[in-house]
Structure formats: structure tokens, C-alpha cells
């Protein structure tokens, strides 16, 4: 079958969030690969504790790393690149997850009033999470 | 063998709430559940109500929940479901009587996606040809018999009757991917909605339930892709 082009059916919140969910899912793979490779290069290869490795991978924050048994690796993580990485991981993960909660909400909550209340709570939680993330990332 | 059927009963004129009746029927392993229902209606309880028409898996009238799974009663054999069988109406649509549900909400969604061919010219001078490959593209979704087994097996539809449902999307797919049709963009606009393709959470219940073995979740995925890319591949 020949490919046929059609007019774009239009932009709306559902469309944008559908797209974001797919792209953020892909971004997670990329961020995780970068994180795990850097963690291994910066000392995790001597540390076989999977929990620590995951903590380094998904939240490469100097404070987290200090908590591990590996001494003096703060220097490797303490820079702008890893701060951006931390923020991206939190932003993609939090937004992806909370949007998922919003999408399935109507499968479990049927009264319109409670749907609005819970959607509002999810939005507030999302804003709060982003603000805390900025605070932690910049404050580390 | 003896088969025990536990059947959902509800008569809005006499019952305050639904209940279950048990019937024992002598049957062969190769008998269909529809044969058992016919036997009960003819010899045990003439008030038992259900829809049936062709009895050969084509008309889609007798979709019901058989042992918790949406099936056509005319295609489900005793040997496949065992000798203890629970028969209930399909979920998510209002029960009118016993195994009969109000199909109007289902057909409302079906009608909303323009399930008909929209040609280019009003009075074309010659036949609109289509290659076998182009016809093959939407062959799977032409098989739908509108039995509602897919839509009423979908938790998103149980949760919200506003959801357009898998069956309507299958029928939209049938015309959207037809190379001769001119209304694909309009249909995709209808499906590009909170209660359109985005309420499909890809749990595959519809694909499992389809008595015609249509790859419904795949078809919905193709609709999502068409919306995102604005292309029909």
C-alpha cells in the first residue's frame, strides 16, 4: 500500500501526553544507559551491590553516592552535566508516572467531582515534585 | 453427559435485582452452548431470554459471558467450557432481560465513526479500482460482525460508557485504511479524543475476546500511529 498523507487531526492534551509518554519512555532507556555506564566507570564496578548501582544510575547525586561504601567519588558526580541528568530523570519519570495515574484515574473513579479533585491533587503533586527536584539538584 | 448451567436471570417487570437459576441439561461434548440454551427454553423454562439469529457465528447476536469469558454461544462447545457452565450477559451495557442487553450505546459509538464508505466523486464515470495489496491492508478489520464481545470485555469501557470502544475503532480502521476512501482524516479527528484511541490501555482483552480473531489491539495501535504521524502506511 502506498503511504498516504492526511491532514493532522489536531493537537490536544491527550495527544501531547500520549506522545510525551512514548518519548519519555525512550528517553529513560538513554538516560539509564548513560547513568549505568558512568556509575560503572566512576567506581560502581568495584561495588556489586545492585541497589547502590541503581541509586547511582537513576539519581546520580553526590549525596547519594557518599552514602555508599565507595569513598571520595563526589568529584565525578558534582558538576552541571550530572545536575541536568538528575533533573531530566526526575522530570521524565515523575511526569510519565503522574500522567499515567491521570490516564487510569477514570477507570477507578467514576464521579466527576472526585475526578476533578484527584486530577488537581495530581497536578499539585507534580508541581511540588518538580520544585523539590530543583531544590535537591541545585542544593547538592 | 449432564451439564449444569448457572444462568443470570433478570426480569425488570418482576425482579428487584438479578439472580441466577440452575438448569441441568443432557448434552454431547460437541454441542454448543446455544444448543443447551435452546433446550432449556424449549423444554424447561420458556421465559429464558437471549438473542440469537443465524446460530453460525456470522450474525453476532449471541455474544455472552460464558464462564467469565466473552464468547458467541453458537461457537462455544461444551467440550471447551466443561460441564459446569455459568452464562451471563456481556458487561458494560444495561441488561434488558436475562441475557439480553441494550445494544444502543454500543451502536451509538459505532455510528459516531462514520462506518461507511466515503468516495471522492458523487457520480464517478468509471469504477474505482483497488489493488489486491491495498485491499489486503484492511482485510482483518472487515471481518467484524458487531457482536460487541470486544467492547464489553474492555475495562476502559466498563469504567466509562463514553469510551468509543474497540469495535467502533475496528470499523473506523476498516475505512481509514481503505485506499479509495476520502474521509480518513475526519475519522481520525473523531478518534483523536480523550474517549477515543487514548482510552485504550493495550491490555488485549478485546483481541482475546474476538470470535473472528481480529487483531484488534494491533488495529488500534495502527490508528494511534496514523494520528501521530498523519500518514496512512
Image (cartoon, coloured by chain):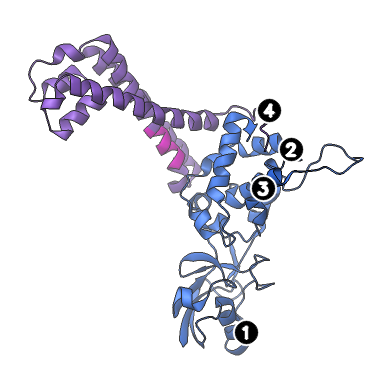
Chain colours: A purple, B blue
Give the residue pinned by disc 2: B183
> In the rendered structure, does residue B115 fall within the stretch colored magenta?
no
Is mark 2 in CB contact (under 8 Å) with mark 3?
no
Mark 1 or mark 2: which comes first in sequence?
Answer: 1
- Per the image, label 4 sits on a secondary structure element best described as loop
The answer for how far apart the CA atoms under marks 1 and 2 are is 47 Å
Q: Nearer the viewer, mark 2 or mark 3?
A: 3
Q: Position of residue A24 (x, y in %)?
A: 41, 28
Query: Which of pointers 3 and 1 lies earlier in the amino acid sequence?
Result: 1
> What's the chain of the residue with tag 2?
B
Pointer 4 residue: A7
Q: Nearer the viewer, residue B84 or B127?
A: B127
Viewer-closest of B132 and A123: B132
Does dot 3 land on a helix, a strand or a loop? Answer: helix
Give how far across and how far down residue B123 sits, in percent: 91, 41
Name the residue carrying label 1.
B46
Q: In the image, are marks 2 and 3 on the same chain?
A: yes
Measure how far apart labels 2 and 3 are at the Cα level.
Answer: 19 Å
Whether tag 4 and tag 1 are in contact, CB under 8 A, the answer is no
Indicate whether A127 appears above or below B26: above
Question: What chain letter is assigned to the residue under label 4?
Answer: A
**Does residue A88 show up?**
yes
Amino acid at each position: 500500500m502506498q503511504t498516504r498523507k492526511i491532514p493532522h487531526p489536531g493537537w490536544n492534551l491527550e495527544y501531547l501526553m500520549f506522545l510525551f509518554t512514548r518519548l519519555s519512555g525512550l528517553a529513560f532507556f538513554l538516560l539509564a544507559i548513560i547513568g549505568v555506564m558512568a556509575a560503572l566507570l566512576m567506581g560502581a564496578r568495584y561495588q556489586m551491590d545492585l541497589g547502590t548501582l541503581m541509586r547511582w544510575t537513576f539519581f546520580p547525586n553526590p549525596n547519594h553516592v557518599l552514602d555508599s561504601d565507595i569513598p571520595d567519588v563526589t568529584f565525578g558526580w558534582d558538576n552541571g552535566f550530572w545536575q541536568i541528568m538528575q533533573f531530566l530523570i526526575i522530570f521524565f519519570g515523575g511526569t510519565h508516572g503522574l500522567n499515567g495515574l491521570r490516564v487510569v484515574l477514570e477507570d477507578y473513579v467514576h464521579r466527576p467531582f472526585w475526578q476533578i479533585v484527584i486530577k488537581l491533587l495530581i497536578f499539585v503533586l507534580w508541581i511540588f515534585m518538580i520544585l523539590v527536584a530543583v531544590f535537591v539538584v541545585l542544593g547538592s | 453427559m449432564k451439564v449444569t448451567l448457572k444462568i443470570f436471570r433478570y426480569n425488570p417487570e418482576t425482579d428487584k435485582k438479578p439472580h441466577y437459576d440452575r438448569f441441568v441439561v443432557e448434552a454431547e461434548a460437541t454441542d454448543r452452548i446455544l444448543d443447551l440454551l435452546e433446550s432449556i427454553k424449549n423444554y424447561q423454562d420458556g421465559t429464558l431470554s437471549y438473542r440469537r439469529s443465524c446460530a453460525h457465528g456470522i450474525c453476532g447476536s449471541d455474544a455472552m459471558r460464558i464462564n467469565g469469558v466473552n464468547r458467541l454461544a453458537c461457537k462455544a462447545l461444551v467440550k471447551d467450557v466443561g460441564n459446569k457452565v455459568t452464562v451471563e450477559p456481556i458487561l458494560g451495557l444495561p441488561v434488558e432481560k436475562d441475557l439480553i442487553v441494550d445494544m444502543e450505546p454500543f451502536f451509538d459509538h459505532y455510528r459516531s465513526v462514520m462506518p461507511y464508505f466515503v468516495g471522492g466523486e458523487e457520480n464517478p464515470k468509471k469504477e474505482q479500482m483497488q489493488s489486491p495489496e491495498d485491499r489486503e491492508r484492511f482485510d482483518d478489520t472487515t471481518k467484524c460482525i458487531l457482536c460487541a464481545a470486544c467492547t464489553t470485555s474492555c475495562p476502559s469501557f466498563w469504567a466509562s460508557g463514553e469510551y468509543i470502544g474497540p469495535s467502533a475503532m475496528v470499523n473506523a480502521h476498516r475505512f481509514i485504511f481503505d485506499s479509495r476512501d476520502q474521509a480518513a482524516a475526519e475519522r481520525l479527528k473523531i478518534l483523536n479524543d480523550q474517549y477515543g484511541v487514548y482510552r485504550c490501555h493495550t491490555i488485549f482483552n478485546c483481541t482475546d475476546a474476538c470470535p473472528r480473531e481480529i487483531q484488534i489491539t494491533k488495529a488500534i495501535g495502527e490508528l494511534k500511529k496514523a494520528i501521530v504521524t498523519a500518514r496512512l502506511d
